[in-house]
Image: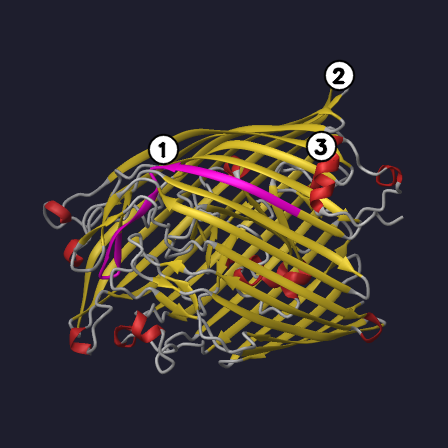
Amino acid sequence: MRAPRLTPLYIALSAVFGNLPQAMADEEKTLTLSPVVVTATRQAQNSFDLPVAIDVIEQKNIKDGQLQMNLSESLIRVPGVTAQNRTQQAQDPQISSRGFGSRSSFGVRGIRIYVDGIPLTMPDGQGQPGVMDLSAIKSIEVMRGPFSSLYGNSSGGVIQMFTQDAPATPTIGATTMFGSYNTKRNVLEAAGQLEGLEYSLNVSNYESDGYRANSSSNKQMATAKFKFNLNEDTKVTTLVNWFDQEAQDPLGLDRARAFSNATRDKVVSAALFANTSVKRDHTQVGFNIEHAFNENNKISFIPYVGSRNNAQILTTTATATTLAATSSRLSEISREFYGADLRWDNKGSLGNLPYQITLGLNYGKSTDDRKDTNLLRLGSIVNTPNRLEQNISSNFDQYLQGNLSITPNLDLHAGARHTKVKLEVQDNFITGTGSNGDNSGNVEYQKTTPVVGIIWKATEKLNFYANFGKGFETPTFIEAAFDNVTGGVASKPNLSLKAAESTNIELGAKAFITDDIRANVTLFKVDTDNEIVTRQTVSGRSSYQNAGKTKRTGIEASIDANLDNNITVFAAYTLLNAKFDDPFVTVINAAGTTGPVNSGNRIPGTYKSQVYGEIAWKYPSLGFFSALEGRHNSQVYVNDINTDKAPSYTIFNIRAGFEQNLTKWRFKQYVRIENITDKDYIGSVRVNDGNALFFEPAAGRNYLLGLTAQYKF
């Protein structure tokens, strides 16, 4: 029996006053199921019954009509998350959650990133989502709000990717894609099961000239997953990730170039003279060892180890217009890292009250051998070292999390995590005193972050929840690298930076408006002390400072509907007010000029409003699928003093294709057209760039074609 089509307001009021129609109470339980998630409680649970803002991106939304190279392709569907495609591969996409992570220039910070429980975020909080090949992913869980603090040193949220499970029947497949800007991508896959073993293998190759000048790139990736079912109670999963990449860096553009049709796809001259670019490789192996003692007790041990090499050429004279005025440096990092998570899961009953509880220990360590070399000095090759040191970050955490069903309609969730992070610098470049003396040092951060939440199951189709928690975010080594860059000369590490601490409050509701329409809404407020912000950027180096108090308030809403005639509709909306509460002084240009940041200024890189909408239609008898996507982002400020901004934009994309299933073969052909109206807009911004190269223009109308063939034995 289909539920009556009631408005969300009527459902909410009826639930409060007890006047829901009897038909709703008596109907058959034919509800569309909400996704089952693991990230929120570390145990599989229906997301509808959790007091958490969490969304799941399914495989079809990761793969259908997508290049599968950047998380930004998929994360734009999630309310509360900003995921900007930088139209280049030299840096990871800009990802922030409720404004946390918006200042990051390299990698992702303020958000914890995992794949199958294995961290892609280092102990200092810096994450690299580009490690994973998205063509090997079956789903992505995105959690925002207070409960993310139970994963440690982060404030904005948790992004966890889950790799594909092996099918019972051995399967091989191949995908080829090609598109605008001479873009090509090829993927080979093989998966299946043998006696006691499940395996999944994936290799891929990507290359592109890029939309802008000096933005060509190539990347080779491999993923291997093996699951050994030793017996009914013990399972061992091994996950291996590898990639090798080369990419040119087009840098940002100033306002004049970015908003001119003649130059928006070009670069500043210094990028060409210096050959700004990056070469990196990454190898990581992780294990998930699970043993169930009985139906109520399970232990999990997740060790991992890996290495990463990164060599990046940066210009230290970004505004230079001639080779004779150009200087550059080579920044090299050789990283070794390892860690482990040990967890015990227990469930049972306290009297007649069901409960679940998790206890865990977590340790991680990363050691970076860092070397900087001056390559060019005013056009002349010099090859002189200017930095040689070892950066060591480590963490040791203990956590407890659980939930108790107080009544059939009321669940209590709570937890706490004690985090200890240590940053240590061992200086091996000592040429005298002052800034070139021994700049070794260390700093330690400790914090216990509690969280508590409650969910009221008002009716079978309507839940209300509330939660409260503390957050903790330490500086990364990139932020602690220099305490002063005035005059373009690097100084000692800034180990006096404080950790940012936040207080989070969240209220929300989850509802099935009908069997086929699901809606979520969340209100949040985050107060942060000691917000870490950029102080100055000069000659490719940045220093940071604590800015006092900030405030983030907002609303997140989404609706997902399966309509008649094979039509589906999805929409997500975010309203975010992210502002500085305390005034402070910052350096506003490479010359060292200071300027005031007023109370009430918006945190740069945060969009006040974001909208994503999609309407999809399938014609099953022909194997046809299609979708129209729309996206709107409001204007965004590019610096703390709010003197410049990128304008708002609205773009539309379409995707369509056919799929054929012929006995053992499955074929798919698809096309995607991005920015179908060919709108000029700024895809991402470089926050607080000292040379005012704030803007990264997005591509105009562009296309992607894909062909997939799969064979089941």
Q: Quadrant of the C terminus?
A: bottom right
- Are the residues at dot 3 and dot 1 in contact (C-beta closer than 8 Å)? no
- Nearer the camera: disc 3 or disc 1: 3
Residue 533 lies, in percent from the top left, at: 32, 47
Q: Amino acid at mark 2?
A: Gly
Residue appearing at x 30%, y 47% in the figure = 390
Residue 229 lies, in percent from the top left, at: 73, 45
Q: Residues within 10 Å of mark 3 (few under 14, many from 20)?
A: few
Residue 539 belongs to magenta span:
yes
Side of 214 where 566 appears, left or right: right
Q: Which mark is residue 445?
A: 1
Q: Earlier in the sequence, mark 3 or mark 1?
A: 3
Q: In this figure, which residue is indicated by the disc labeled 3?
A: 16
Side of 508 where 378 appears, left or right: left
- Nearer the camera: disc 1 or disc 2: 2
* Quarter where residue 50 is shown: top right
- In this view of the protein, which residue sits in the foreground, 704 or 242? 704
Residue 134 lies, in percent from the top left, at: 59, 61
Q: Residues within 10 Å of mark 1 (few under 14, many from 20)?
A: some
- In this view of the protein, which residue sits in the foreground, 190 or 652? 652
> Which residues are drawn in magenta?
520-542
Residue appearing at x 66%, y 36% in the figure = 464
Q: In this figure, which residue is indicated by the disc labeled 2?
A: 351
Residue appearing at x 87%, y 40% in the figure = 23
Label the magenta part by its dominant secondary structure: strand
Distance from disc 2 to disc 3, alpha carbons, whole Å, reads: 29 Å
Q: Secondary structure at mark 2?
A: loop
